[in-house]
Image (spheres, helix red, strand yellow):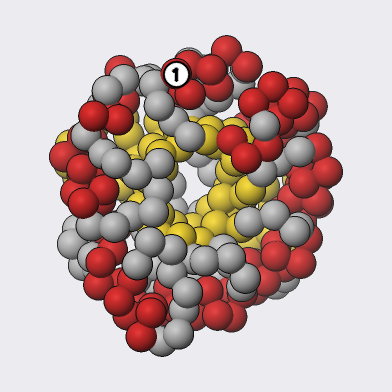
């Protein structure tokens, strides 16, 4: 297993940090740059920035607030939100992103993954996947902020995206988003079986134990969270100490 990465996620609307539950009930929780700086200073391994309304509004990712983010933080960061062209990816990389997260555009045109990977290298191409459970042991891929069921299973999509040149996956459990009741272990176990690429678990973190359990039980390569970090319920520094004490090999500790 690779060294585990701890990744805070910053959802943005109009330059402000927001957070909701199950992709709805969104509330403003802070300033993008100040929060990113805090995470950089407290040993985050990466930061993910999502423009969460770009896809629904049919526009490109708003990079205004991220144009000089590199002057505020010292850790790698990735950008997601309606990235649908090679030009969009280049814009993100030009402001300093080390990776981009593509989601809806890849589902609509799977060949976009290969084009992006061929152009920029697979290590820069993260495929973000938003999923909901349909029945026990089955999860479907959703688009448009969790409102549109594609009818495609997450396993089918992960296998296809892997074959097309994805570099890694961020799997977002819509059912667990903001609920703080633990990650869906069954989901991430199945995803890990479907790909040999790194898998980042997102959706459900509420306690130190939740992080430990998903790492050990599902074998994920990283854990992503927002609420518990934003509200100061868990600090990344303390989380890394906790995981190390329990024998987890944590990156950057």
Q: Quadrant of residue 217?
A: bottom right
Secondary-structure class at tag 1: helix
Horizontal and vertical percent position of residue 130? 58, 47
The correct choice, above or below, for 91 with respect to 97 in the image is above
Q: Nearer the viewer, residue 174 or 165?
A: 165
The residue depicted at 40 percent of the width and 48 percent of the height is 46
Q: Nearer the viewer, residue 21 or 3?
A: 3
Q: Nearer the viewer, residue 1 or 148?
A: 1
Horizontal and vertical percent position of residue 179? 38, 64
Is 121 placed left or right of 253 in the picture? Answer: right
Q: Given the current orientation, which residue lies at the most extreme bottom position?
A: 246
The correct choice, above or below, for 68 with respect to 1 in the image is above
Q: Quadrant of the N terminus?
A: bottom right
The correct choice, above or below, for 4 with respect to 130 in the image is below
The residue depicted at 76 percent of the width and 67 percent of the height is 193
Q: Within 10 angstroms of label 1, few (less than 14), some, or many (20 or more) residues?
A: few
Is 222 placed left or right of 239 in the picture? Answer: right
Residue indicated by mark 1: 94
The residue depicted at 41 percent of the width and 39 percent of the height is 77
Q: Given the current orientation, which residue lies at the most extreme top position?
A: 87
Horizontal and vertical percent position of residue 175? 51, 60
Is 56 placed left or right of 218 in the picture? Answer: left
Residue 93 in view here: yes
Q: Quadrant of the C terminus?
A: bottom left
The residue depicted at 48 percent of the width and 24 percent of the height is 93
Residue 132 in view here: no
Count of all numbered marks drawn on residues in the image? 1
Horizontal and vertical percent position of residue 204? 43, 65
């Amino acid at each position: 297993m690779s060294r585990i990465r701890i990744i805070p996620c910053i959802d943005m609307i109009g330059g402000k940090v927001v957070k909701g539950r199950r992709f709805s009930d969104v509330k403003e929780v802070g300033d993008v740059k100040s929060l990113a700086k805090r995470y950089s200073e407290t040993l985050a391994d990466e930061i993910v920035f999502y423009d969460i309304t770009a896809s629904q509004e049919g526009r490109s990712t708003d990079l205004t607030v991220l144009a000089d983010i590199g002057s505020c933080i010292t850790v790698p960061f990735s950008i997601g939100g309606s990235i649908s062209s090679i030009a969009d990816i280049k814009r993100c990389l030009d402001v300093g992103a080390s990776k981009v997260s593509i989601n809806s555009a890849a589902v609509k045109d799977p060949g976009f993954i290969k084009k992006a990977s061929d152009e920029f290298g697979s290590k820069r191409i993260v495929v973000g996947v938003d999923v909901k459970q349909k029945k026990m042991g089955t999860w479907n891929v959703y688009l448009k902020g969790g409102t549109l069921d594609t009818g495609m299973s997450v396993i089918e999509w992960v296998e296809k995206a892997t074959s097309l040149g994805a570099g890694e996956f961020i799997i977002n459990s819509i059912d667990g988003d903001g609920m703080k009741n633990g990650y869906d272990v069954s989901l991430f176990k199945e995803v890990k079986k479907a790909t040999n690429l790194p898998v980042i678990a997102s959706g459900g973190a509420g306690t130190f134990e939740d992080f430990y359990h998903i790492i050990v039980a599902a074998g994920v390569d990283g854990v992503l969270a927002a609420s518990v970090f934003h509200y100061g319920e868990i600090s990344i520094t303390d989380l890394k100490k906790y995981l190390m004490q329990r024998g987890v090999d944590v990156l950057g500790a």
